[in-house]
Image: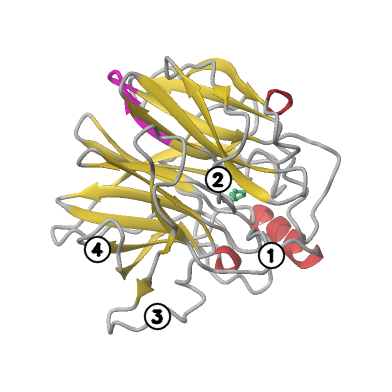
Amino acid sequence: MKKFGVFSLLITILSICGCGSKPQSNEKAEPKARYLYPDDYMADPAAYVFNGRVYIYPSHDWRSGITYNANGEAFQMKDYHVFSMDDVENGEVTAHGKILDLKDIPWATSQLWDNAVAFKNGKYYMYFPARDKNNVFRIGVAIADRPEGQFIPEKEPIKGSFSIDPCAFEDNGEYYLYFGGSGSTPDGLSSSLARVVKLSGDMLQFAEEPRPVVLLDKKGSPIRDPNAQFFEASWMHKYNGKYYYSYSTGHTHRLCYATSDNPYGPFTYQGVILTPVVGWTTHHSIVEFRGKWWLFFHDSRPSGGVDWLRSMKVIELNYNEDGTIQKIKGGGLW
Ligand code: FUB
């Protein structure tokens, strides 16, 4: 995440007070989105249905004292919590508490960012990124018997893993991990490339070399428009037999999506799911629960626009008859 600066902060402040002289959008906050946990800052909400309930696994933002810089070091998350509910619209959100702590992960040193959880053969597997002892982002696994945790981390990260924002996805009994984020490759290069990899049968390793997630425009050419290019925040869901790959465009602050007939892609760009929110980052998950589809996401409105103090939200997501997703307004002014 190479991104923050005074300009970013200024834009965010203008977004919040709605007083930018040249706003790039005049959208108002989406009224129907529900903040899920006003008691604390939680971001990157990864939502799943386990045992008839929705479980949400966010990143846990806090005031570490580090403010914005080019490497995203303001995001010093050091533990994970889990939340659940049985009614997305109005139900009580149960906070189950802490499920994994940085100090208990032998290989990790900092920055527990967006995670993902998968269920297989009676166990829950959490995939999470963190910086290792060489300051490189790797992806680790932690295992639990229940969705509420506790999650016990493996001693080493996944062999050959790198980067951030894992998304675990099950399809016909095979498990895939989508991941990647600009600036978080081992060589430190900015790489706007997502990866997809099949997981091993024991869920603890990659079963193959990660492959690029190829995103094409409607003419079949690689996407060059910054408003549509991948930056971070991979998510995969399936709808009517099609694979929907969604992601953040980073510097242009949109959540976009592309579809394919194959979980490996290539994916054809379809459009914007969520226009910019208040705050620099945008990150989400999409899940079906009791016949409705939901977009879980975050924004920085409750913190007064602090990019690294985000709050998780949810809003219903609707499809058109042709399978395209109806665009949702994020309420930001980027
Ligand atoms: O929460 C830390 C990082 O911010 C995530 O990994 C990115 O996707 C962005 O939301």
Mark 4: few, some, or many residues within 10 Å (few <14, many ≥20)? some
Residue at the spot 23% in from the left edge and 61% down from the top edge: 324
Q: What residue type is labelled 1?
A: Asp
Mark 2: few, some, or many residues within 10 Å (few <14, many ≥20)? few
Residue at the spot 61% in from the left edge and 70% down from the top edge: 23
Q: Which amino acid does label 4 sit on?
A: Ser
Choose mark 1 or mark 2, whichever is in front. Answer: 2
How are the colours assigned in the image? secondary structure
Report if residue 27 lies within the magenta region. no
Label placed on residue 237: none
Label placed on residue 222: 3
Chain-order first, disc 1 or disc 2: 2
Choose mark 3 or mark 2, whichever is in front. Answer: 2
Indicate the position of residue 22 as horizontal and vertical percent values.
64, 74
Query: How far apart are labels 2 and 4 at the CA level?
Result: 28 Å
| Residue highlighted by disc 4 | 260
